[in-house]
Amino acid sequence: MSTELRDRFFALSTGRAPADEVARYRAQVDATDTGPTTALDGLAVCWHPTARFKAVRFVDAERLDADVRDLFARPSETAPYLAAVFVDPRELSFRTFENILPLDRLFADAGPDLKLIELTERAEFAKDAYSFALRLPAAARARLEHLDSLDLYVPPLNAASRGGDRFIFHSALLAEALTAAVAKAMPQSSLEGFSHVNPVFRCNRFEPGDANFHRHRDTPYYDAARKHVSRYTVLLYLTGGSGAPVLDLTDGGALEEIEPFTFVIFDQRYEHEGAPYRDGRKVFLRTELVFTDPDVAHDPEIAALFSKACYLTGESVFAPELARHADAYYNQVAAAHWSGLASGATREPFVHKRFRGVQFVANGYDFWFAKSDELSPAQCAAITLLDYFNCKVGDAAFRALCESEVIEADGTDWIPAFLEDKRGESPIVPFDKSMLFPEPEKPNTRELPDCACGICSGGMLSLNLDTTRNADIIEHYTRAQDSAKADIMPAPILMLGEDVLLDPDMFVVEGNRIHVLGKESLTPVNFASCQGGPPVPPAEDFVTTAATVDVAHFLVPPILFAESADCYHLTFDFFRNSWMVNHEQSTVSVPMIRPFEDDDINEYWEDYDDEDEDWEDEDEDEDDEDSTVSETSTAQAN
């Protein structure tokens, strides 16, 4: 059944199946309740669609666990290294909204031909808007033409406003070749500070009759660390045709007809719209020209609006009506980068949420909580982080655990009174993390015997070996604890199953700021790796997992807060006007020492090869050379 669901998904995704057949298939998927197969980038993934795992994505198959990798479909015959996975859209967060495919392998097949790409026949059809003919060798042309046939399109998050299909891919090879071509073809007056073509490309496809890509401005790329900002949008049309118009720059020029492999560059200040071709498929790539600009100014109001737009994009999975608000915010932000922030609509959307005993109101930049004796600013900050990054609590995403409703209102003065009767007890409680790491027992001097025979073990081994007092086992236990502590102790928030725990020491309240402490990067955690051995298991095999703890580490700016008689009001900006801070969540095993059991002898005895052990006394007259070889082999084995 699962294999059929997987294969029929791709058979029906061509769009040519009868509507009743598609409806029956969807009903069958909705009736299928299967757990995740594995996890990738913090997302639970399944190898076939289910009622929960409905959104398809494509990933490098090598990143999937080897023992389940073959279950996942490889729907693109010419890119067999890409596997299709199904995810729960309710679990998406800022790190996983977009599915960016690694396609450098595709362009590596073009070899040095990519470097021969040229832009010719430049024409300026509007101020700071140019069209070129893209001239390229046959191998490079074939690679670009091949993109559409990969069938990697997925519905975008803003499908209601943009029309068509798209997929996003990364290719440093293609970007490098286009960077060189742009540097030669563009007017030098337009290239001051030019750095490179962005290696992230959006491949867009429109069929005749599809909705227009509605009028909008492209949100500029910005990297605060490198002082990079985009100034020009790049469109590479892989197919030709005519539209009404194909590209329309508001208060600028328009292109009614496009030849295949036309390369268009225009200033990102332009608001623009694109229509499908009248008589054929429209396929084009979009990226941008990135410049180095150390003098970019910052406007916190623009940053706040951008943060709201991103938050509402995630919330639109639960409340589709929020998508239009997010789209309007994105357009406001894009325009504000060039001409300052203009006033928007007076009514704004807010999300009222209930997480277990706590209710709050949020818009993605502001978070309001009703004050109560059970709720501290640190606990408010913890709930804010869990919500903003949609962290996993147990097996569910935080936002899926909340009861939510959308409220449109003028201003924010209504919020304290709205929350006044909604005070509750916080489900996030302080926790002493040292309780996870009890001190080991005082070791005795006895070492593990070499085998389980009565002679070596002094009789019944299971009656004589106290694993909690063995020095070798305690040594491994201490190492495992130290490894787990490296992840757990700096974490401000822990999840023990469905329980959310908070370390108050990791939330430092200083004036009107809440500083969230934690380590900057995560390191792999490995416990009690089994290396096999003689019938008596090695010491590390007695160190096992007492519990698994989900730890959430955040690298975020301070969270500002204010309090009134009835309300805590938290404000913060994770993006800082479009650059994104890091957030990681991982699962850590807490070690414990298990007791010795009789089954340990049986398990290891079955795998024991007595040819590798000398059970008899060696002949004192044995050849010296043979003895040396035997000792060397034993040392290597040890």
Image (cartoon, rainbow, N blue to C red):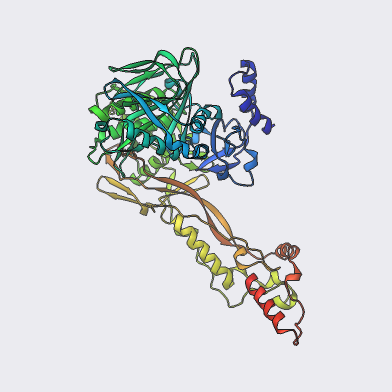
Q: Quadrant of residue 223?
A: top left
| Residue ranking furthest to the bottom | 621
Q: Quadrant of residue 360?
A: top left
The residue nearer to you, when weighing 490 against 631, is 631
Q: Determine whether, in the image, residue 46 is placed left or right of residue 623.
A: left
Can residue 220 be seen from the camera position used here?
Answer: no
Q: Position of residue 462 (x, y in %)?
A: 69, 69
The residue nearer to you, when weighing 478 against 42, is 42
The residue nearer to you, when weighing 612 against 106, is 106
Q: Position of residue 616 (x, y in %)?
A: 77, 79
Q: Determine whether, in the image, residue 100 is placed left or right of residue 302.
A: right
Q: Quadrant of residue 353?
A: top left
Instruction: From this view, report whether residue 166 is shown above or below residue 550.
Output: above
Q: Position of residue 105 (x, y in %)?
A: 52, 40
| Residue drawn where x is 70% and y is 31% of the image | 1
Can residue 615 be seen from the camera position used here?
Answer: yes
- Work out which quarter of the rendered image holds the C terminus and state it: bottom right
| Residue drawn where x is 42% and y is 13% of the image | 243
Instruction: From this view, report whether residue 161 is shown above or below residue 632.
Output: above
| Residue drawn where x is 59% and y is 32% of the image | 76
Instruction: From this view, report whether residue 196 is shown above or below residue 25.
Output: below
Q: Position of residue 221 (x, y in %)?
A: 34, 35
